[in-house]
Amino acid sequence: MNEISILFGTPLISSTVDLDKIKVGPTNLKKAYLSQTPNRSGIDLLSKESISYLKSKLATMVEEVKNLLNIKSCDLYIQHIWLNDYQEKDYQESHAHAGNGFSFIIYYDTLKCNTILEHPAKKEILCGQNPEEDYSIYDTHFALNKKNGDIIMFPSWLSHFVKPNSDGKTIAGNINFRKILKND
Ligand SMILES: [Fe+2]
């Protein structure tokens, strides 16, 4: 009998949010990233009620991966939050939010999802090949198919990028934990 284990799995948790409960405060956008995408960051981006709603939603998403991560209980907090308003084919280069627990993206006012997640071992799989010419059986890019009101959460070390688009707004952020491991 064959036995299968998935080693070093990468959880991607998807859900939906009630956009009526995500109230963005006054936006004073500043250019950010290589593409100079209009951006605003800071915990005051959202009203207190919205942050509280979002924290509860994120907690239910973390709950799904508690066993996988060997966490008995955790008290999450939103470390960073920002809004991107993609204009004129703005994009984001490949990056990760390492040093945090999970990162999330809310598709807040977008026509199309332009986020691409990258395989954590992309470099080793491609081994110098162009993804277009890669003959490996392993996919190195994962294109998400999300719509307004969807939210995703993934480990902050997972690289991702945003294809050039002028498609509107996403709200993203990083969360961290005061956690208690099962063996503690
Ligand atoms: Fe990001």
Image (tube, rainbow, N blue to C red):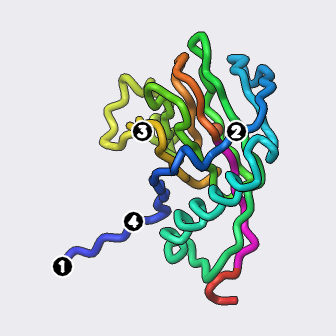
Q: Nearer the viewer, residue 48 or 15?
A: 48
In three-dimensional space, the C-alpha distance between marks 4 and 3, rounded to whole angstroms, equals 26 Å
Q: Is residue 23 above or below residue 37?
A: below
Q: Residue at x 56, y 45 (%)?
A: 20
The three-letter code of the residue at mark 4 reads Ile
Callout 3 amino acid: Lys
Residue at the spot of label 1: 1
SS under mark 4: loop
Along the horizontal axis of the image, is 69 left or right of 100?
left
Magenta segment: 172-179
The x, y position of residue 67, in whole percent, is 51, 77
Provide the residue designation for mark 3: 146
Tag 2 secondary structure: loop
Q: Where residue 117 sits: x, y (%)?
A: 50, 40
At a point 57% along the width and 32% down the height, the residue shown is 161
Contact between marks 1 and 4 (CB within 8 A): the answer is no
Residue beneath disc 4: 6
Q: Which mark is residue 26?
A: none
User: Looking at the image, is mark 1 or mark 2 nearer the viewer?
Assistant: 2
Which badge, 1 or 3, is on the more N-terminal residue?
1
- The disc, 3 or 2, on the residue closer to the chain's N-terminal end is 2
* Numbered disc 3: secondary structure: loop
